[in-house]
Amino acid sequence: MLQVLETCESKMQKSLESLEKDFSSLRTGRASVSLLDKIRVEYYGNETPINQVATISVPEARMIVIQPWDKSVLSSIEKAILKSDLGLPPNNDGKLIRLNFPPLNEERRRNL
């Protein structure tokens, strides 16, 4: 009986962790770096998580700034964002990439 209880608790804990991860990627109208967690960038022949090749910050409520440590990876980051399901066009200025989030109105909510 104790083993069944421990197994159930373990499965419930994993379910809660998965749900928390899914909730963190919800679009709420505010920019969040967790939206980029699933994006992988082609970097020296390897698929690398974007947060391992760049600094990601949120300077404003509706903007994410991605500043790569190696400027040669800018185009790879831009391509990875375009291929993702974010639906946001990256703005590349040659030094960093900006992602601007439009205001979340009723029409955008329906599209999402």
Image: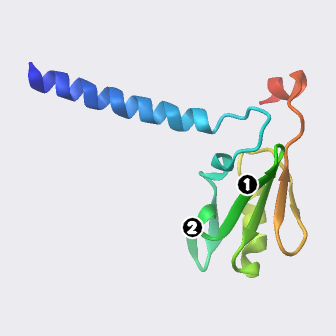
Q: Which residue is mark 1?
A: 83
Q: Secondary structure at mark 1?
A: helix
Residue contact at pointers 1 and 2, CB within 8 angstroms: no
Which residue is drawn at the image coordinates 43% and 35% (left, top)?
Answer: 17
Residue 16 screen position, x and y as percent: 42, 29
Q: Which residue is mark 2?
A: 47
**Residue found at the far top of this picture:** 1
Task: Give the quadrant of residue 24.
Answer: top right
Residue 15 screen position, x and y as percent: 40, 30
Residue type marked 1: Lys
Residue type marked 2: Glu
Residue 90 screen position, x and y as percent: 84, 57
Name the image quarter holding the C terminus: top right
The answer to whether residue 69 is left or right of residue 82 is left
Residue 35 screen position, x and y as percent: 67, 46
Distance Cα–Cα, label 1 vs label 2: 14 Å
Task: Give the quadrant of residue 44.
Answer: bottom right
Which residue is drawn at the image coordinates 89% and 34% (left, top)?
Answer: 103
Q: Is residue 77 above or below residue 11?
A: below
| Mark closest to the chain's N terminus, 1 or 2 | 2
For the rendered model, the colour scheme is: rainbow
Q: Is residue 97 above or below residue 1?
A: below
